[in-house]
Amino acid sequence: MSPRLAAGLPEAALIDGRPGGEVSALERGLHYGDGLFETIACVAGSPRLLPLHLKRLLHGCRRLALNPPDPAQLADEITALARGSERAVLKLIVTRGTAHARGYAASGEERGTRILLRYPWPKEDERLTNEGVRVRLAELRLGENPALAGLKTLNRLEQVLARFEWSTPAIAESLMFSSGGDLISGTASNVFLVRGGELATPRLDRCGVAGVMREAVALGAQRARITLKKCTLRAEDLAAAEEVFLTSALIGVRPVRELAGRALAVGPVTRRLQQELAPLLTGEERLPVSASA
Amino acid sequence: MSPRLAAGLPEAALIDGRPGGEVSALERGLHYGDGLFETIACVAGSPRLLPLHLKRLLHGCRRLALNPPDPAQLADEITALARGSERAVLKLIVTRGTAHARGYAASGEERGTRILLRYPWPKEDERLTNEGVRVRLAELRLGENPALAGLKTLNRLEQVLARFEWSTPAIAESLMFSSGGDLISGTASNVFLVRGGELATPRLDRCGVAGVMREAVALGAQRARITLKKCTLRAEDLAAAEEVFLTSALIGVRPVRELAGRALAVGPVTRRLQQELAPLLTGEERLPVSASA
C-alpha cells in the first residue's frame, strides 16, 4: 500500500481489483466528478443491502451513460473486502475512467475505474439510534437538476459546503431545502416525516440522493402496512410533523429528538419501522438478489 | 512519468511541484469534486492572462474555504511548465487535499493538492476565429446555486452531460440556460450578445463559470468605449441579438455564425473587440500583476 494511503484512514484499498492507493491524475472522476459512489455498511463480515447498492449504482451508470463495471465481479470484490471485519464501512467509487483527451467530451470507449476503500466503523454513541439526534436546518440550498437528481454522483460540493455550516458534535445533521424551497434531505441522509400515522418522504426528482436505506424503509413500511408517500414537502410539513427520522446505509433509521430547537418525541411509527428493519440491519435477513432487478 | 499518464494526452505533469502522474485515492477532489481548476493558454512559452487565472483561483479558494496554494510558488511552476512550448494548454487543478477522515466534514488542516498538466495545443481550424462557429442550444439546464455560482469547481457533471448531447464536429458549442430559464453560457465558454452597438453578457450569480476571457472582454470593451452590461438575459434576447460571440481562455473571442439554425453575420462590435484584445492574445501585451488585485 502506498505511503499516501497509509497516512489516511482506510484499512484496505483496491483499485480496479488490485491493492493500491493511487489513481491516475487524468481520472475524469477527479477532473469533473464524473462518476458515482456507494457507502456500504458491512456487518458480521458481509455487505448490508448489497443488492440495493448495486441496483442504484447500475441505474446511475445508465443515467450518466457510463460503462458499468461487471456486477458479479464487483460483488465478489466487495464481499471479499468485507470478509474478516465484524463491522466496517466500504466506500465504492466508480468513475468514467481516465480521460482520453482534454475537455468534457468522452469517446464512450473509456474503461471505468473502480475504487474500493474499507474504513473502520465510525466511533459514535450507539444510544443515538434509540434516543435520537439533534438536527438543524441548512442555510445552503440545493440546486435543481432532474438529469442528476436521485443519483449519488461525485459532484458533492453542495454537501461539503453545507457540512461546513456547523461544527458542534451535538448536532448530528442538517436538513436541506432545494432552491425552490422544497424539503429534500440531510447532507448525508434521507428524511422521513410522520403525520397522522402515515409516512412521507421528499420526492427526489429535482435534486437529492435516493438512499438505499430509503428504499429499505419503503420495504419495511409495506411489510408493516404503513402508508408511505413520496411527495413534495415544504417547511410547514416539517413543522407539522409528529415524528421525524433520518436514514442512511450506515445509521439505519435514526429518530430526530430535536429539530431546529423544537423537541420531538421518538414516536410509535419510527419504533415500528426500526423493529421491522432490525433483521435487515443486523444482517440476520438478507435481501434477495431479485431486489436488485 | 507513470505509465498511466504516458498513455494519456499530457506531455508533462507536476503533482505538488514534482513530476508524477498519480494522486491519492483519498483525494477530496475525487471523492467530492472538492476543488477548482483553471485552463491556461500558453503562447510564446508564457501563460496567457495568468494574473486573471490566479485571481479567480484565489477567489474560489476563499469561497470554498479551501487553503490556497502559495500564489508565487504556483506562478513559478506554471511559468516553468509553459516555457519551451510555442503553444500549449496548461490545466491546473487545486483540491482541498486528501481526506483525513470519511465524510463531508473537513478538519480545515488539509493541505491542498495542486496538479498541473501540460497538453498540446488543440488541433483545430484556425479560420474559426475569423469566420465564426455553429452553435446549438442545450437541452440540459443548469441547477442554480449562488454558493457555487461563478466558480470553476470540479463539479462539472452538468457540462459533461450537456457535451454528450451532440457529437458532430460541425457544431462547436451548446448554449445553456439555467433551471429558471436564463441564458448562462456555453458548456465550456462564456457568451456575449450585441444589440444596438452595446454588449451584454449573462450575470453569473446563480450558476455558470465567470471566465477569465470574459474579464478580458470587459477590459477590452472599456478600452474601446463599448458599453457592457452584465444582466439577466433570456431566450428572446438571444433571438434578438445582432451579433453573438463566445469566449474562453483558449478560443479568445470567437464569433457565432449560426445559432440554432439562424445565420448570423460576424459584426463590427465583435471585430472591434478581437482587434482590441489581439495584443493580449498573442502575448505581445501582458496584464500587470495588479490586474489580479
Image (spheres, coloured by chain):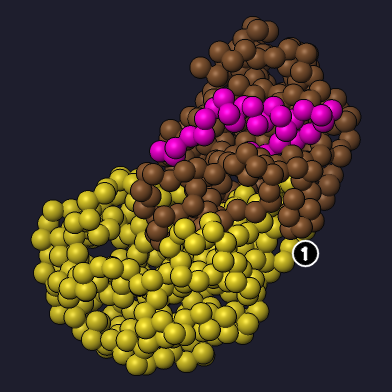
Chain colours: A yellow, B brown
Q: Is residue B122 left or right of residue B142?
A: right
Vertical side of B248 occupied by A284: above or below: below
Q: The disc numbered 1 marks a residue on which chain?
A: A
Q: Which residue is mark 1?
A: A109
- Whether residue A62 is in magenta: the answer is no
Q: Which residue is rendered at x = 74% and y = 50% of the image?
A: B1
Q: Which residue is rendered at x = 53% and y = 50% of the image?
A: B29
User: Residue A266 is drawn in which quadrant?
Assistant: bottom left
Q: Position of residue A287 (x, y in %)?
A: 43, 89
Q: Which residues are magenta?
A: B65-92
Is residue B193 visible in the rendered structure shown here?
Answer: no
Q: Is residue A2 left or right of residue B132?
A: left
Q: Which residue is rendered at x = 46% and y = 49% of the image?
A: A157
Amino acid type at circle 1 is Glu
Vertical side of A159 occupied by B81: above or below: above
Q: Position of residue A117 (x, y in %)?
A: 50, 69
Q: Position of residue A176 (x, y in %)?
A: 33, 54
Counting every numbered tag in the picture gives 1
Vertical side of B198 occupied by A193: above or below: below
Disc 1 crowd, CA 10 A, few/some/many (<14, 14-19, 20+): few
Q: Which residue is rendered at x = 15% and y = 60% of the image?
A: A258
Q: Is residue B193 left or right of residue B147?
A: right
Q: Secondary structure at mark 1?
A: loop
Q: Position of residue B3 (x, y in %)?
A: 76, 57
Vertical side of A184 occupied by A276: above or below: below
- Whether residue B75 is in magenta: the answer is yes
